[in-house]
Image (cartoon, rainbow, N blue to C red):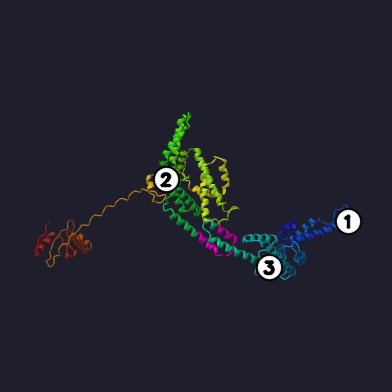
């Protein structure tokens, strides 16, 4: 009361909430029936009184329903006890079609206006427990044949929607389990799934297997606390470290070996570590470098054979064919040239493979177009037989489950799919058989396509590497010499002047000397501290004469040279020269 009626008041029904057993739907049906009965009785009374053509006194049933609900919205009823008893009796009296949603909605409709122990609410709660038993039996019957928790949860959720089962009991304070037996059955399925995931985790040897285990763990044990999550993460990290160590040690560093083997290793590492991993990027760059070096040698080795076979074919296919005997001689020479080229072709096929454009171009020139295509078709049929032996890839209905494929089978499938991709590219548009192979192994070709794209460089087949670059194999990929201006050499500091200390005088008599300061008067000297001036004069005399400072003492200043001369004569010392 006091809010707009739900859609069921206007005639629509909802299976999850009991359809016509919603409280306002029941109220609408009661008002509609009452209005229809009153209208029928009013029309019958008018016919008895002879007023058949008059308008009916009672409104139509839909109008009566609209009027009643409008008054209910404008003036909400204060006392709904009688209404609640009547509606609840009609809802709870149903034995078929009653759902938990209808009971819960009726309880939420009248609980705010009635006491908690009102008979109408008690009757709804009692009927709720009775219907809950039927719901639990329906759930147990549906999950009886389930082998995985995810299947059981799907059946349980479908059953909850059909019966309108709430997540918790609205009037319960402690939120007890609504379907205890169903929870026990689901818990048992979760325990079995946990053991199965643990056993599958022990068999994981590839990143695809770890991803499959992680997805199965979240699908089957969603919301369940289990130590398997941390074990899966630890297994993933350990597997990545193992693959990184294998990449560094299996082929040496930088990697060296036949290009087909290195290409397969790079594709496998990119599948396990991801195409953006630093180890994968360095490994692929080393593969490109080794391929360029081998292509140079292969071009020098196969070019003479190609030149001979090409010349002989041109003579045989000239506009004016040669005479019969000459043609037989040319054919014999061509067979001998092809026989001589078998050994270098097999050697460079092992070293370079069909992934090298230069080797493919030389091979096509030596064998000729028809023989080359026949050779590629035979190779494609051989690879297709290998893929058929391995069976469908994981994920397909007839194939193994994701993550159940062994590492050996996964590597073999990756190698065969890469070889088939190379053959189909060389045979593109040549026959209907290639289209059939592409359709038959579309899944395998799609899986290997990203790793194949990593090994196709923009300058594939272009011998751009310099001799210096090939000699610097020990340097990391992408190494570049950067020339920087040299720092200017700082001049060496001058050697210190060695000063010879004079021999001490010992007990010799002291020497008295006189010196004259030119351009300075006695008044200028006494303007400032005379003691400081004499100390500076003593330092200058010691430095200029190269004698210790402590040898100079008893300095004094006089005003004129005459006074100095008189003093010197009186003391018996030589008169200083001016």
Residue 216, picture quadrant: bottom right
CB under 8 Å between discs 2 and 1: no
Q: Does the magenta stretch include residue 222?
A: yes
x and y, in percent, of residue 11 in the image: 75, 56
x and y, in percent, of residue 492 in the image: 26, 53
Q: In this view, does 13 lie above or below 311?
A: below
Q: Does the magenta stretch include residue 418?
A: no
Residue 529, picture quadrant: bottom left
Judging depth in this view, the residue of 552 and 561 nearest the camera is 552
Query: Is 264 on the left or on the right of 17, as rendered?
Result: left
Q: Tag 1, which secondary structure?
A: helix
**Is the N terminus in the top left, top right, bottom left or bottom right quadrant?**
bottom right
Front position among marks 3 and 1: 3
Q: In this view, does 177 lie above or below 417?
A: below
Residue placed under numbered mark 1 in the picture? 46
Q: Can residue 450 be seen in this view?
A: no
Q: Tag 2, which secondary structure?
A: helix
Residue placed under numbered mark 3 in the picture? 171
Give the distance between the C-alpha atoms of the residues marked 2 and 1, in whole angstroms.
111 Å
Mark 1 nearby-residue class (10 Å; few <14, some 14–19, many ≥20):
some
Residue placed under numbered mark 2 in the picture? 294
Q: Can residue 572 be seen in this view?
A: yes
Tell me the magenta residue range.
Answer: 212-236
Query: Which comes sooner in the sequence, label 2 or label 1?
Result: 1
Query: Is 395 on the left or on the right of 113, as rendered?
Result: left
Mark 2 nearby-residue class (10 Å; few <14, some 14–19, many ≥20):
many
Judging depth in this view, the residue of 227 and 147 nearest the camera is 147
């Amino acid at each position: 009361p006091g809010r707009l009626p739900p859609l069921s008041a206007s005639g629509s029904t909802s299976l999850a909430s009991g359809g016509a057993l919603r409280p306002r739907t029941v109220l609408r049906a009661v008002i509609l029936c009452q209005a229809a009965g009153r209208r029928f009785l009013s029309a019958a009374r008018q016919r008895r009184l002879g007023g058949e053509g008059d308008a009916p006194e009672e409104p139509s049933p839909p109008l009566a329903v609209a009027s009643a609900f409008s008054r209910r919205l404008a003036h909400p009823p204060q006392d709904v006890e009688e209404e609640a008893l009547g509606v609840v009796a009609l809802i709870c009296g149903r034995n078929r079609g009653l759902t938990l949603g209808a009971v819960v909605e009726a309880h939420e409709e009248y609980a705010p206006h009635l006491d908690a122990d009102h008979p109408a609410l008690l009757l709804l709660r009692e009927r709720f427990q009775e219907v809950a038993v039927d719901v639990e039996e329906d759930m147990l019957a549906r999950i009886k044949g389930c082998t995985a928790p995810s299947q059981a949860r799907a059946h349980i959720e479908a059953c909850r929607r059909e019966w309108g089962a709430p997540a918790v009991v609205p009037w319960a304070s402690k939120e007890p389990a609504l379907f205890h037996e169903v929870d026990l059955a689901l818990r048992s399925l979760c325990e079995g799934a946990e053991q199965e995931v643990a056993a599958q985790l022990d068999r994981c040897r590839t990143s695809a297997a770890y991803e499959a285990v992680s997805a199965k763990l979240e699908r089957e044990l969603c919301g369940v606390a289990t130590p398997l999550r941390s074990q899966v993460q630890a297994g993933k990290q350990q597997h990545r470290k193992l693959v990184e160590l294998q990449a560094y040690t299996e082929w040496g560093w930088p990697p060296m070996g036949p290009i087909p083997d290195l290409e397969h290793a790079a594709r496998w590492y990119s599948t396990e570590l991801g195409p953006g991993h630093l180890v994968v990027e360095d490994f692929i760059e080393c593969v490109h470098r080794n391929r360029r070096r081998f292509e140079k040698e292969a071009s020098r080795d196969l070019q003479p054979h190609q030149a001979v076979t090409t010349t002989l074919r041109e003579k045989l296919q000239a506009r004016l064919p040669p005479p019969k005997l000459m043609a037989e001689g040319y054919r014999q020479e061509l067979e001998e040239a092809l026989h001589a080229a078998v050994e270098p072709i097999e050697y460079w096929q092992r070293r370079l493979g069909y992934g090298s454009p230069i080797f493919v171009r030389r091979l096509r020139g030596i064998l000729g177009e028809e023989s080359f295509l026949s050779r590629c078709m035979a190779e494609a049929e051989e690879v297709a037989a290998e893929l058929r032996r391995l069976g469908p890839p994981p994920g397909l209905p007839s194939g193994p489950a994701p993550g159940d494929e062994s590492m050996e089978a996964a590597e073999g499938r990756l190698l065969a799919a890469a070889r088939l991709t190379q053959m189909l590219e060389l045979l593109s548009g040549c026959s209907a058989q290639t289209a059939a192979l592409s359709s038959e192994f579309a899944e395998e070709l799609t899986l290997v396509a990203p790793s194949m794209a990593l090994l196709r460089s923009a300058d594939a087949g272009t011998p751009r590497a310099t001799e210096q670059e090939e000699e610097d194999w020990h340097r990391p990929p992408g190494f570049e010499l950067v020339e920087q201006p040299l720092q200017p050499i700082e001049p060496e500091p001058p050697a210190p002047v060695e000063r010879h200390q004079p021999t001490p005088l010992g007990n010799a008599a002291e020497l008295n000397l006189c010196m004259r300061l030119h351009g300075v008067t006695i008044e200028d000297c006494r303007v400032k501290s005379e003691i400081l001036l004499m100390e500076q004069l003593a330092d200058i005399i010691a430095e200029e004469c190269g004698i210790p400072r402590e040898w100079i003492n008893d300095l004094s200043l006089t005003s004129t040279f005459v006074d100095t001369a008189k003093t010197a004569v009186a003391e018996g010392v030589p008169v200083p020269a001016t």
